[in-house]
Image: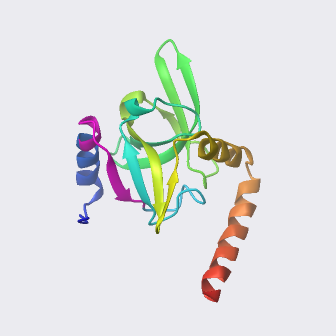
Amino acid sequence: MPVIHLQAEPFAGLAAEILQDGRRLRFTAPGHSMAPFVRHDDILEVAPIQEYGLRPGDILLYRRPNSRLIAHRVVRLVRRQGGLQIHTQGDALAREDGRIAPEQVLGQVVAVQRGERIIRMNSWAPRLAGLLWLRLGRGRALLLRGWRLLSADFRRLH
């Protein structure tokens, strides 16, 4: 499969166009805000949101006002007279991102490829695991630190 390298703004426009056309998108995840469920350099597969609906625990790809794309987990959905408010948070972050408007959402992460392994993210088990992880609150920082130390030790052994 060909690999194309794009800067953030052109990538955001292309991703929006592909997903709005009803097609899926695959790209390499940058950053660490979704560790341990999504790791830096994992390959994310994103589907248009209408394929699966929207539920707490799902990982969404959405556009920030500065055109930057973010893939974070839905913490809760709040329906108000003004419409739907989506609250998201990175699994490795201490705070929610704030409210996301439905029109900012481009798609849903439905799979994560890590090496040869493919993890389906749109089933109940990964959603529940992600929500439980977020509920650990401050304890996540300790667990993440331990996980990073163990994974670094494991890499040194192999």
Give the quadrant of residue 145.
Answer: bottom right
The quarter of the displayed image where residue 146 is located: bottom right
Residue for point 23% across, 53% down: 10
In magenta stretch: residue 68: no
Q: How is the structure coloured here?
A: rainbow
Which image quadrant is residue 52 in?
A: top left
Q: Identify which residue, 22 or 78, lies in the foreground.
A: 22
Q: Residue at x 39, y 42 (%)?
A: 64
Horizontal side, residue 112 vs residue 6: left or right? right
- Quadrant where the C terminus sits is bottom right
Looking at the rendering, the stretch of residues picked out in magenta corresponds to 18-29
Expressed as whole percent of the image width and height from the top left, the position of residue 142 reads 75, 62
Tell me where residue 3 appears, x and y as whole percent: 25, 66
* Relative to 56, residue 149 above or below: below
> Is residue 21 a member of the stretch shown in magenta?
yes
Q: Residue at x 23, y 36 (%)?
A: 21
Left or right position of 40 against 130? left
Nearer the observer, 125 or 69: 125
Which residue occupies 32% across, 49% down?
25
Q: Residue furthest bottom?
A: 157
Q: Position of residue 129 (x, y in %)?
A: 66, 47
Give the total number of marks visible in the rendering: 0
Q: Picture coordinates of residue 143 (x, y %)?
A: 73, 62
Q: Quadrant of the N terminus?
A: bottom left
* Left or right position of 153 against 72: right
Q: Give the left or right position of residue 144, taking residue 29 as reference.
A: right
